Image (cartoon, helix red, strand yellow):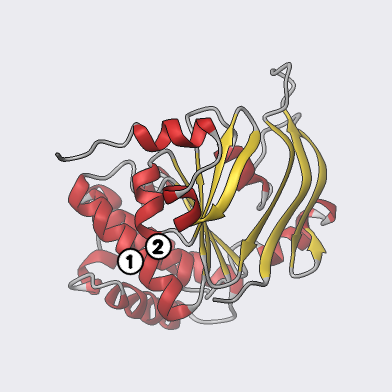
């Protein structure tokens, strides 16, 4: 496996004006190229805050110290215009609920084409052809019907696959995933998880994924980073974290996973 980081957090601290303690505290973590790095921990541990800091999705009043390095550039020092050049084209994002990400009053095709044309100098017809190819590559039957549908006409799994297709259409080198399976049933969640694993293995995309499910992290992650109350508790390969964890909190998370005896 490639052991070169594509993304590095260096002594990152994130503070919200409504909190007396940092949401993320002096965190340093490398995300390796061509691997899936899983961020696990209980709700409120700072996982999603850390993820969203990469593309500047912090709420008003948020203060950050430290560095976030991507392609040798500190993302925290970029202007809004410079950040737009990275967001979408080089760094993709998949949210927890695609139904909230997609505009309910517009058809999928219109939204897909608009996203592509915001980054590429192509016609609407060309954008729709790209959209069809992306949806077909994700094993979605009848891409034409999906593009002609409103979001509410699609199942949760179909909407999440469509969101993945939109994120991957620009061929970003880094994909950020904020609990992409938690809003789905078990079957659709497993399919989306396998799909993300395939994207990593076949297309070489690097993935940083937030989850509260350490079982999912063990199933598809290459590296696992455990967070608690804004701090990085433990980080290592999947085998190290699952089989030989060092920290009591990690052990408690593992013991909380249901087992069939």
**Residue 113, percent from left and from top:** 44, 69
Mark 1, residue position: 195
Label 2 secondary element: helix
**Residue 50, percent from left and from top:** 63, 43
User: Where is residue 143, by image quadrant?
Assistant: bottom left
147 relative to 25, above or below: below
**Residue 3, percent from left and from top:** 63, 72
Instruction: Say which residue appears at 61% left-offset and 27% top-offset.
Output: 229
Cα–Cα span, label 2 and label 1: 9 Å
Mark 2, residue position: 164
Q: Pointer 2 and pointer 1: residues touching (CB < 8 Å)?
A: yes
Residue 107 visible, this angle: no
Mark carried by residue 70: none
Q: Nearer the viewer, mark 2 or mark 1?
A: 1
Instruction: Say which residue appears at 50% left-offset and 44% top-offset.
Output: 245
**Residue 63, percent from left and from top:** 79, 34
Instruction: Say which residue appears at 42% left-offset and 49% top-offset.
Output: 242
Give the position of the C terminus as an image quadrant.
top left
Residue 146 visible, this angle: yes
């Amino acid at each position: 496996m490639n052991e070169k980081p594509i993304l590095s957090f260096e002594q990152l601290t994130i503070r919200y004006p409504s909190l007396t303690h940092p949401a993320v505290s002096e965190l340093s973590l490398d995300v390796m190229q061509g691997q899936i790095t899983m961020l696990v921990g209980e709700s409120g541990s700072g996982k999603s805050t850390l993820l969203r800091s990469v593309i500047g999705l912090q709420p008003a009043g948020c203060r950050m110290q430290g560095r976030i390095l991507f392609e040798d550039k500190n993302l925290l020092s970029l202007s809004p215009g410079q950040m737009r050049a990275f967001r979408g084209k080089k760094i993709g994002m998949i949210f927890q609920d695609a139904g909230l990400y997609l505009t309910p009053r517009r058809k999928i095709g219109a939204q897909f084409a608009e996203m592509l044309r915001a980054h590429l100098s192509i016609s609407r017809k060309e954008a729709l052809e790209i959209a069809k190819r992306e949806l077909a590559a994700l094993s979605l039957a009848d891409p034409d019907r999906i593009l002609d549908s409103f979001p509410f006409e699609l199942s949760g799994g179909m909407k999440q696959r469509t969101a993945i297709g939109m994120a991957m259409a620009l061929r970003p080198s880094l994909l950020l995933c904020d609990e992409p399976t938690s809003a789905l049933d078990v079957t659709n969640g497993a399919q989306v998880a396998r799909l993300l694993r395939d994207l990593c293995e076949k297309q070489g995309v690097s993935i940083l994924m937030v989850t509260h499910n350490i079982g999912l992290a063990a199933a598809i992650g290459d590296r696992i980073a455990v967070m608690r109350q804004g701090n990085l508790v433990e980080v290592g390969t999947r085998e190290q974290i699952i089989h030989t964890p060092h920290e009591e909190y990690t052990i408690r998370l593992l013991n909380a996973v249901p087992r069939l005896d």
